[in-house]
Amino acid sequence: MPTINETVSEEIRAQARKLLEEGTVAAVIGYAAGSLPMTVKPLVVRSPEDCRKLIWNTFCVLNLANYLPATLKSVEPPRGPRDPKPEGPLPKVAICATGCWSRNIVVQIQEHQVARDRVVVMGVGSRGMVSKRKVQALFDGREILAVEEGDHELVIQGADFSETINRWSVVRDNCQTCTHPDPVLVDVRIGEPVSERKNPNPFMQVDALEQKSGDERWAWFTEEFSTCIRCYACRNACPLCYCPTCFVDDAKPQWVGKSLDAVDTGLFHILRAYHCAGRCTDCGTCETVCPKGINMRMLTKKLNKDVLDLYGIEAGMQPDAPLPLTTYTMDDPQKFMVAEPSAVKEGK
Amino acid sequence: MKVFKITPAELDAMIQEWSKAHPVYAPALAKQPAASPDCAPGWSRVDGNAPLTLPVGPPPASVKTFFFPQPETLLTYTLENNHPDKGLMREPAKSQGIQVVVGVRPCDARSVLLNNLPYQEDPFFQANRQRTALIGFTCEQTRSTCFCTQMGGSPLGSEGLDLVFSRTRDGFIVEVGSAKGEALVADLDLAPADESEISALAARRQEEVKASSTELDTLKGRELGKLYDAPLWQPLGESCINCGACTFICPTCYCFDIQDEVVRGQGRRIRYWDSCMFPLYSLHTSGHNPRGQKVQRTRNRFLHKLKYFPDRFGPFSCVGCGRCVQDCPVNIDIREVMTDLLAVE
Amino acid sequence: MNDQSTNWEPKIIAFLCNWCSYAGADLAGVSRFQYPSNIRIVRVPCSGRVSENMIMSALKSGADGILVSGCHPGDCHYISGNYFARRRFALLSNLLDFIGIEPGRVSFSWVSASEGEQFAEVVQSVTEKVKALGPASRLVKKIDALETALQVA
Ligand code: SF4
Ligand code: SF4
Ligand code: SF4
Ligand code: SF4
């Protein structure tokens, strides 16, 4: 019997082929098999024949929404920067999307990076993606040469071993605490819908750190980011980061220095996370792609928690509502402010 | 060349001895504490007690950090008006003495020699080279991502190393590769290695040479224009996210940028890593960017390593360590790029 | 360098909006309300103009404290600038606390053009808090290599 993901792969291939053959879309964004165990390659398919390359498995960890704006641009007829928009509707692009990725697409729509009517979302309910790093940690330096995926277990093979492990135990932290695994936008349904997960506390890790003293949190912060090499994979892999010139690259004024100075690295991470406030869907891509395994997601998760606590908003859940930082209410909480002398006097 | 033999216990004692006189570094096993000036990212300062453990294949961080520190301070100056140094630019005082890097694999050692080609006249790189002793360990086992033999290297290679340790049944044989290496073992009373073990190693090296492939060398004769215009770049450029991960973990990527930093009236001019994958890398002051598109930048990295560099200097600018293969978030695999390039008509 | 034992006085950068808090500071001066001289004022058009980049940049450059002050909610010269700012500052303030920046290093307040006395009070209380914390060290950039080089020279 085929595994769930084999069935999903089959459906993705069939639907992608159909969409391309009918001419509904000009390109499909998905995944192809990788050259190493537990890796996949993002792939943009432009012809029905190439659809056979598409796959889906438990290692699809990179958020495909990151590719959406550029792919949409690539299928438009070429034109100069001052040429008018061509007449008639522009070609569409289909994209495989899980819960969080679809929420990122919603954010892209809210931020006018993507036009809703040009996207065909091939929605896949996510069963949680596996962290390669977690698997590797179990094998302590022994090289993994092949991984076979079942619905609930993984068979890990090396030169002189073969072990079966429980899949959920190595699923990424962000997927384990995810509450919305099913896409919020679905144009073409792939596989079975996945129900909302009742998570006792999605912000567990943030809460644990909040419990600690300020000095301990500072120690965590300096320690966690001390190995960062400033490669910016975390930034570039994130679908939220599309500014033509990032604040770290600004030279006049230079907000953040460029070398491995601990302060500069710290500022980069604080500001990067902050710029994702109210927009981050906790897709975990940033953490996954970091060659140093740094948990920068802790910062965005903290912001997600505050945005939910203070403004009751989860990024990408309401396509028609404004983003939390582009709106306000008259009585937003302001406990953090210096006690207002006048307000105190008036006894407000 | 002198060849000694040594037991693992003696090796640890030797490292301990060195660490009394010099800073000694070994690949960091766990995450190290916050960066302090004498820590190189990915390497930890050896204090002598723990026995040396090395990962299979190249350690995650390459030796590049010792030759291209992040940052290298080129000049310092002050903007304070009444400072006697006002208006002067000074070279920072270089620390005297050597640093010893233990646990270097043959691929990384070769990378230093390759980087030396374009940096022959660079005083900073040369100074760092002078003060760094590389203590190598040949590879008993390789990783599936290692392909040094395709790039002109060997798991048993000794090029560029000051001391080379190779496993024997009950310990190591140590080859002295340079005067610097010689000085490190001069005061130690080491027994010369047995002839049989020396010839066994030589024989294994012969085998490696036979097994290595020179197929890639045909790229050197190929017409650049054809490789440049090949259709293989489009999908690669499309999936590459243009992060700098591959370039920063690569031992043979050596590009830099220079900037001045001024903090409270004190300034320094620093050199720090840059990456051809970043759009800013090739941006002109005029606003024009000759590599404004992602695909152009991705192509540049590979063609630089596999075509431009060999055309100019001879060898490829890749030692086959496989780090980029392991860590690229979108699985762009230089081995596949090489195969595709060879297949270009 | 800053040292508490040698009568250290903190430097506090105050980002004040032109229409309310800056005018409030002006009024405090004209009305001769005493407040500590530790603040260095940066006049900005609106509290909504103060970006996280500016705040972090001030910290990095060695400010011991930072105060951002704008018009009271409802009084913004640009109608809603301070409402947007309030959301952003709330998140920033929490995030800084989360990573271990001492509460009180970075403060936010509302002071109107007519609140000269209140302005003096705010500055007083912010300065006291920063003094109690001592000189800033977290996220303050130092160029160590440079300082040694200059000493050698
Ligand atoms: S910040 Fe990280 S978790 Fe959040 S959307 Fe971006 S990549 Fe995903
Ligand atoms: S991906 Fe990791 S190493 Fe690279 S900049 Fe981000 S945190 Fe630093
Ligand atoms: S090849 Fe991979 S590691 Fe290198 S820039 Fe592209 S995505 Fe990043
Ligand atoms: S290109 Fe990749 S394999 Fe070659 S030296 Fe650099 S990191 Fe190693």
Image: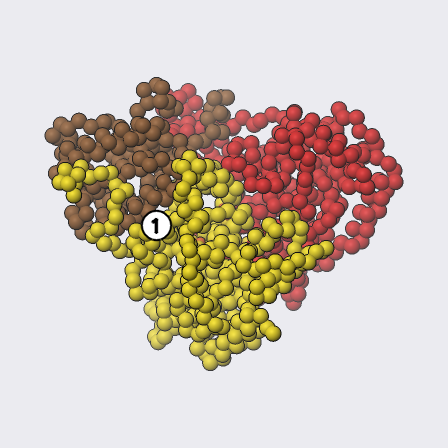
Chain colours: A yellow, B red, C brown
Q: Residue furthest bottom?
A: A22
Residue B172 horizontal side relative to residue B45, left or right: right
Res C67 → quadrant: top left
Who's the residue at 81% across and 39% down the image?
B170
Q: Residue furthest right?
A: B196
Task: For label 1, count other residues whose C-alpha is less than 10 Å away and answer few (under 14), some (14-19) or many (20+).
Answer: some
Res C100 → quadrant: top left
Who's the residue at 34% across and 29% down the image?
C133
Which residue occupies the foreground of this view, B84 or A231?
A: A231
Q: Is residue A63 above or below residue B29?
A: below
Q: Quadrant of the C terminus of chain A?
A: top left
From the image, tell me which residue sits under label 1.
A306
Res B180 → quadrant: top right
Who's the residue at 87% across and 38% down the image?
B195
Which residue occupies the foreground of this view, A280 or B245?
A: A280
Who's the residue at 52% across and 77% down the image?
A14
- Ligand 3 lies in quarter: bottom right
The image position of residue A189, as x and y in percent, is 45, 73
Residue B302 horizontal side relative to residue C107, left or right: right
